[in-house]
Image (spheres, rainbow, N blue to C red):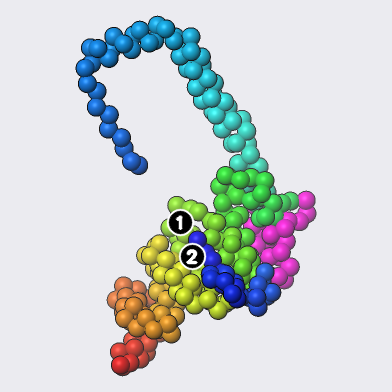
Amino acid sequence: MATYKKRGYKKSISPAAEKKVELESTTAEVFEKLDTTASRTEEWVSKFQNFILAGVGIIALSVLSYLGYQNYIFEPKKLEAVSELSQAQYYFELAVNGQEPDSLFRRALNGGEGKYGFLDIIENYKGTPAAKLATYSAGMAYLNLEDYVNAIEYLDQFDTEDVMLKSLAKGAIGDAFAQIDQPEEAYEYYVAAFESSQNSFSAPKYLFKAGILGATLGKKSEALNYFKRIQSEYSDSKEASMVRVQIGLLENIK
C-alpha cells in the first residue's frame, strides 16, 4: 500500500508536497460409520424436507438472480462504460501528444462534451474493466499534472493481471514518490516494477532507476547488481549504453 510522509507522522506526505499536489486452504473431511450416518441423514431429510426445499429454492433463486444481473444489467453496463471511456481516453491521448496537455488531462479526468471523465467512470461503473482502466489512466493524468499525491492514490488502487500495465503503474508510483522526496518508497516501487515484468521495454528502465536511486541510498551491492543485469539481460536497451560508467563508479567505491 502506498503511503506518504507528513511532518510529525510516519509514512505520510510532507506539507510542501501536499500543497503542491494535493498487488486456501483446502479442508479434508473424514467420514466414518457410513451406514449409521446414512440412516440418520434419511431421518433428518424426512423431518426437515420442507426447510431443505425452501433452502434449495433460495439458492436457485440467488443463482438465477446473479445470472440475470450478469446478463441484463452488468453486461450492458460494461458496454456503456466502454463508450464513456473512449472519449476520456481520446482527451488523454491528445494531451500525451502535446496539444494543451494540462487542459486536456483535466478534461480527461473530469469529462467534457456531455461525456464522463475518468473520475466519473470510476465512480459510476465500479467493477467493470473500463473502471479499472480509468483508474490507471486517472493516476497517469495526475502524474502528468504534477499532482503526485492523487497519482499515487489512483495508481495504487489499480489492480490488473496484465503484467505490463502492472509494471508501468508501479514504476509511475515510484516516479511520484521520487518527486515528493520520498526516495526509499520510490526505490521500493521501482524494484516492484521490474519484478512485475521482465519485458524489454519497462524492466531495463526501472532497473536503471532503482540502480541510480539505490546508489544514493547506500545500497551499493543492489545497485551494482541492477546495472549488471541491464548490461547482460537487456544489452539492446538504451539504458545498457549508460550503465558502464555507473558500474565503474560503484566498483571503485570502497
Indicate the amino acid at tag 2.
Lys
* Mark 2 vs 1, N-terminal side: 1
Q: Residue, x 34% and y 78% (percent of image)? A: 222
Q: Residue, x 24% and y 12% (percent of image)? A: 36
Q: Hey, which quadrant is residue 100 in on the image?
A: bottom right
Note whether 180 is above or below 66 in the view shown.
below
Q: Residue, x 78% and y 51% (percent of image)? A: 114
Q: Position of residue 221 (x, y in %)?
A: 31, 81
Note whether 58 is above or below 135 in the view shown.
above
Callout 2: 10 Å neighbours few (<14), some, many (20+)? many
Q: Which residue is mark 1?
A: 23
Q: Which residue is mark 2?
A: 170
Disc sitting over residue 157 in the figure: none
Q: Main secondary structure of the magenta part?
A: helix
Note whether 98 is above or below 119 in the view shown.
below
Magenta includes 90? yes
Left or right: residue 253 versus residue 5 is left
Q: Position of residue 175 (x, y in %)?
A: 53, 73
The answer to whether residue 186 is seen in the rendering is: yes
Callout 1: 10 Å neighbours few (<14), some, many (20+)? few
CA gap, disc 2 and disc 1: 9 Å
What are the residue bounds of the magenta stretch?
86-114
Indicate the amino acid at tag 1.
Leu
Left or right: residue 21 versus residue 112 is left
Left or right: residue 63 versus residue 98 is left
Asked whether the beta carbons under mark 2 and mark 1 sit within 8 Å of each other, the answer is yes
Magenta includes 98? yes
In the structure shown, which secondary structural element does the residue marked by tag 1 occupy?
Answer: loop
Q: Hey, which quadrant is residue 196 in on the image?
A: bottom left
